[in-house]
Image (cartoon, coloured by chain):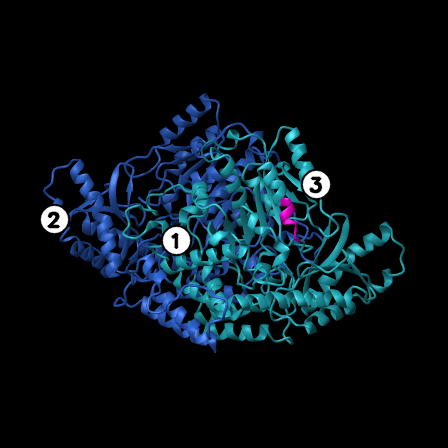
Chain colours: A blue, B cyan
Amino acid sequence: AFLLEMVDILTNYVKKTFDRSTKVLDFHHPHQLLEGMEGFNLELSDQPESLEQILVDCRDTLKYGVRTGHPRFFNQLSSGLDIIGLAGEWLTSTANTNMFTYEIAPVFVLMEQLTLKKMREMIGWPDGEGDGIFSPGGAISNMYSVMIARYKYFPEVKTKGMSAAPRLVLFTSEHSHYSIKKAGAALGFGTENVILLSTDERGRVIPADLEAKIIDAKQKGYVPLFVNATAGSTVYGAFDPINEIADICEKYNLWLHVDGAWGGGLLMSRKHRHKLNGVERANSVTWNPHKMMGVPLQCSAILVREKGILAGCNSMCAGYLFQPDKQYDVTYDTGDKAIQCGRHVDIFKFWLMWKAKGTIGFEQHIDKCLDLSQYLYNKIKNREGYEMVFDGVPQHTNVCFWYIPPSLRGMPAGEERREKLHRVAPKIKAMMMESGTTMVGYQPQGNKVNFFRMVVSNPAATQSDIDFLIDEIERMARDL
Amino acid sequence: AFLLEMVDILTNYVKKTFDRSTKVLDFHHPHQLLEGMEGFNLELSDQPESLEQILVDCRDTLKYGVRTGHPRFFNQLSSGLDIIGLAGEWLTSTANTNMFTYEIAPVFVLMEQLTLKKMREMIGWPDGEGDGIFSPGGAISNMYSVMIARYKYFPEVKTKGMSAAPRLVLFTSEHSHYSIKKAGAALGFGTENVILLSTDERGRVIPADLEAKIIDAKQKGYVPLFVNATAGSTVYGAFDPINEIADICEKYNLWLHVDGAWGGGLLMSRKHRHKLNGVERANSVTWNPHKMMGVPLQCSAILVREKGILAGCNSMCAGYLFQPDKQYDVTYDTGDKAIQCGRHVDIFKFWLMWKAKGTIGFEQHIDKCLDLSQYLYNKIKNREGYEMVFDGVPQHTNVCFWYIPPSLRGMPAGEERREKLHRVAPKIKAMMMESGTTMVGYQPQGNKVNFFRMVVSNPAATQSDIDFLIDEIERMARDL
């Protein structure tokens, strides 16, 4: 009975999420929520609350949250609320099991295996051979890739530590995700040994710069190990030229990782997958179905071309979990491949969505999102008050632009204008959040002052929502 | 409508899970499931399936899975199916957001902050001050502790890598969880620099052995960094003597981590919390509410006594996510503390359960589980055919024992008996799984041949379920 009342609250929430007359959020500052909004008390206590109060707490939790599935929520790379995926996640929580052994997750372990194989086939590895695992997010998937590369070239580091290896360096573009640097710090390489590559004006790695920096590192006595090519950068949505980078990696015998956390989904689209040409030459690939493919959070895969290396890198053979004398084929106990012990079941929602949509359903979703961002690009590229951050049609759904309020339009270029323009996006964003009508991200990048980064990954969004966003920006900026 | 049909399937599953006439599992080998049981086809395809077929797939997924909430499922440290926790997880999936910023997870970020503070208060740190984060499992929480210790003593490793530090060594007991070794491998220390400590016959670290090994390491020119004390070991449920270990850590200026993944829950019990005496002297603590406290998977916290060090260790200040010029207090954007970027909302189910049960509800749950394992211990300690792996009342709910089938009872001690006994637990376990009536874990440990490890963490279990387990073991072993 309690569960059914809860379901009533949740299905109501879902319905309203798709209703454009509902706000995206009802913003309050931290201190306001902490003080207890209309009796919504976040503090925990010794005594139990009644079930009625629990249901009220649940309603309040949703009321003061953010509707990430709302058609006008454009704030993150992950958005949307897929009903099949949601149902899959409800089943997953109800099954409440753990991915480490076939013994307690037989169906989920097999689903993971089949789905990873399918993803490897789409990458283009022969017969979908290789290895992989679902991990808690793209940052951890990227961390895996660095660990595996190190294990491939310097397996003794596993037992003897980094002192058994020379000074190793990693390469990634200045536009790449910060998780490569984070992995460098965590795994003992040091952030100074993560060398940032220059990009062209579209945010794509310049291959010649990679080669020059490899040569430079070698001359200094360092040992180049790993190159990350980004397929769909976080801010610009740029695709690094994988084939040219792969040529260099082959020449210098380096591990090539493709971070397709954001752009990997385009492999599902016959129209757009050419942007990842060369991905089949990568040694490892990160691909987050929870981003471009609309799978509920979290769902991220690290895929590896060489079979067995993932287990070699991470296995510790704990006897209490991975008994060799079980009655079934224990090669299906995959837990020892992970840096985690217990591992959440992230596969089922994805598997179920794939069943329900088919590969062609994902393709349609991706093509539609890219069409929408092209619609936005065409709409604003010559519109008064807009400046594009880079020229040309975006490669992914990222559309990056400044909005120039009327008061700044006549102002000559220079530091004063830069400073004023830098404050425009944060102000508009704050107004958006306070009015609760829409949300879109902004950030500076290099020497560029704050600009909006629009992304579309929500299948519920339409051209009218794009129009709405533009109207809102212009309405809010009127008096800036 | 689809969601409601799904809810019908799930609530039916929940009801049956608590019904003892339902089997714990319906075992099939991997090849059987892969071949497609009664039309249950795991393969993915290009074309979509009908919603009716999706519902059938969901029913099949549950049918061939394992009921980890069944009162006779004793196989893992995590078991049970708490209805409030489940409802909380359904809400979490429906909200489908990400913990990295207050911007998109205002309520969940505050809940996490308040709950971590409450946990630190229970640890005994003054005013609950300190830091912490929920992470995807105890292994990652333990990895955090090693990273933070390294950052505390050798902050330059973050930028310069392990070559900026001397040869660092970590200490942990031979009974501790393998994740400490895994962290040693991943973070660049090397497993050989994870020094295993001897234990007494109950699996508890011998403090004198720790001190001797610290001295030995220093004499070899290594630098001791970190000691892990286990509060509730995986197999024996042993609690290392934290106060005595803390004395040594203070003497040699080492980081003290307490791995309370399994035993941390006992802090909620006035009767049992003395087993963690000294935990307030730790620098960091791992505590998994998804184990002893029955919170759905996953829910693991790493708690740190020193404020600010977690962010210092991990922050990369990504401009696109952690903009300093937001309109709200951005110290609530906690994502840069994490080694992840996106982070699943693991807090809500726990917060909701705490609201619904109160601290006293968790206490009752824990006391009940410990009473049940004492019941099992009393029942079998002098019973014919049972040998206890160690003497005395277990410290946690772990009861470790050999069952000696009638055919082995007269046999003299020696290699033949050892070999035969080693095969008993796997055989009984295989029969249990094939009949589907109950599940319990087994493993060897050191020079001890395979024995059963019984654990109780499911609040639905009663004395009759313990009796049933014993009857099943004896019934199945009759002809061995």
Q: Residue furthest top?
A: A219
Rendering quarter of residue B477: bottom right
Are the residues under badges 3 and 1 in a single subunit?
no
Q: Position of residue A223 (x, y in %)?
A: 49, 27
Q: Which residue is mark 3?
A: B209
Q: Which residue is mark 2?
A: A406
What's the distance in space between the residues labelled 1 and 2, CA to CA? 35 Å
Q: Is residue B242 magenta?
A: yes
Chain identity of mark 1 = A
Residue type, mark 1 in image:
Lys
> Within 10 angstroms of label 1, few (less than 14), some, or many (20 or more) residues?
many
**What secondary structure is found at the residue carrying circle 2?**
helix
Residue at 62% across, 63% down: B271
What's the distance in space between the residues labelled 3 and 2, CA to CA? 74 Å
Q: Nearer the viewer, mark 1 or mark 2?
A: 2
Q: Which residue is mark 1?
A: A291
Residue at 43% across, 41% down: B312
Are the residues under badges 3 and 2 in a single subunit?
no
